[in-house]
């Protein structure tokens, strides 16, 4: 018999009522303590990606949708409906996390990463669009300060900054935001996030005054580029 440990647990009345309702609706537990053990196991399994949890309503809804899909003779469906049905019939709730790990994963973009990517794309939109409008002498001035070429957004490192790169692609290719960068290779092949953070810190005070006829000037662009290269 597995070793057990007694734990003292205090729950709010509302949560206790929800547990009681779960016992009544599912009939799966003989007591509150038994219900809590089962619910903890369900929670740990689902949040760690080791299995999925379906209510009886979820199961019924899936089977109805499966019947509809079969009746409509839908071809090339992305989800193997018969596999999921067998998972439900057999209670193999670990199986979908193995076969469909692109769906059942625990990754979620960090808000701070989204914020960084949006600010970076916004900043480089201003830089690139302004450079396109400069005169040849002004462009030559920027080239001279940037190793002989005009600067462009190089993206994020696919090896070390994968989440940032993924967010960039999703914003640009799937959401059609920042269309200037569409169809570009955004893999910089070297870390860039730290440099962009430094640039953004200097760009934010300037950003407040841009628009309505006010744009970046050559000096500001060169200063931003110098910040990017600073270690």
Image (cartoon, helix red, strand yellow):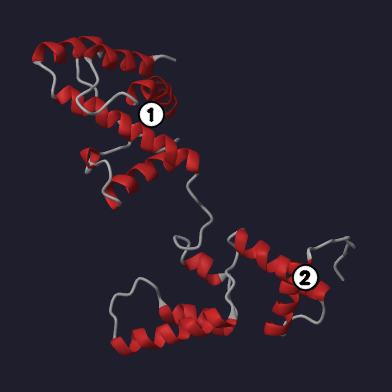
Viewer-proximal residue among 21 and 43: 21
Report the Cα–Cα distance between label 2 and label 1: 52 Å
Residue 128 versus residue 93 in the image, above or below: above
Q: Position of residue 219 (x, y in %)?
A: 26, 11
Residue 163, quarter of picture: top left
Viewer-proximal residue among 193 and 201: 201
Q: Position of residue 137 (x, y in %)?
A: 11, 10
Alpha-carbon neighbours of circle 2 within 10 Å: few (<14), some, or many (≥20)? some
Q: Secondary structure at mark 1?
A: loop
- The quarter in which the C terminus is drawn is top left
Residue 107 versus residue 70 in the image, above or below: above
Q: Is residue 104 left or right of residue 182?
A: right
Is residue 152 visible in the rendered structure shown here? no
Q: Residue at x 18, y 22 (%)?
A: 131
- Of mark 2 and mark 1, the one earlier in the sequence is 2
Q: Residue at x 10, y 16 (%)?
A: 135
Q: Residue lying farthest left?
A: 136
Q: Position of residue 200 (x, y in %)?
A: 39, 25
Q: Residue at x 53, y 79 (%)?
A: 58
Q: Which residue is mark 2?
A: 16
Is residue 103 visible in the rendered structure shown here? yes
Number of the front mark, 2 or 1:
2
Q: Is residue 191 left or right of residue 214?
A: right
Is the C-beta separation of discs 2 and 1 under 8 Å? no
- The quarter in which the N terminus is drawn is bottom right
Image disc number at residue 190? 1
Q: Residue at x 43, y 41 (%)?
A: 114
């Amino acid at each position: 018999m597995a070793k057990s440990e007694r734990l003292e647990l205090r729950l709010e009345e509302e949560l206790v009522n929800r547990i009681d309702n779960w016992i009544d609706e599912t009939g799966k537990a003989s007591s509150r303590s038994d219900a809590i053990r089962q619910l903890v196991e369900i929670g740990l399994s689902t949040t760690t990606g080791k299995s999925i949890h379906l209510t009886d309503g979820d199961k019924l809804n899936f089977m109805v949708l499966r019947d509809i899909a079969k009746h409509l003779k839908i071809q090339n469906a992305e989800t193997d409906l018969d596999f999921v049905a067998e998972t439900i019939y057999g209670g193999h709730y670990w199986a979908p996390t193995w076969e469909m790990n692109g769906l059942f994963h625990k990754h979620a973009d960090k808000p701070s990463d989204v914020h960084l990517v949006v600010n970076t794309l916004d900043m480089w939109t201003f830089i690139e669009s302004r450079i396109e409008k400069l005169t040849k002498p002004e462009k030559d001035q920027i080239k001279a300060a940037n190793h002989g070429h005009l600067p462009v957004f190089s993206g994020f490192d696919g090896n070390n900054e994968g989440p940032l790169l993924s967010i960039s692609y999703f914003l640009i290719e799937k959401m059609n935001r920042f269309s200037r960068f569409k169809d570009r290779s955004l893999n910089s092949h070297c870390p860039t996030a730290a440099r962009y953070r430094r640039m953004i810190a200097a760009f934010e005070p300037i950003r407040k005054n841009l628009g309505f006829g006010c744009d970046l000037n050559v000096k500001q662009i060169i200063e931003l580029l110098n910040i990017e290269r600073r270690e």
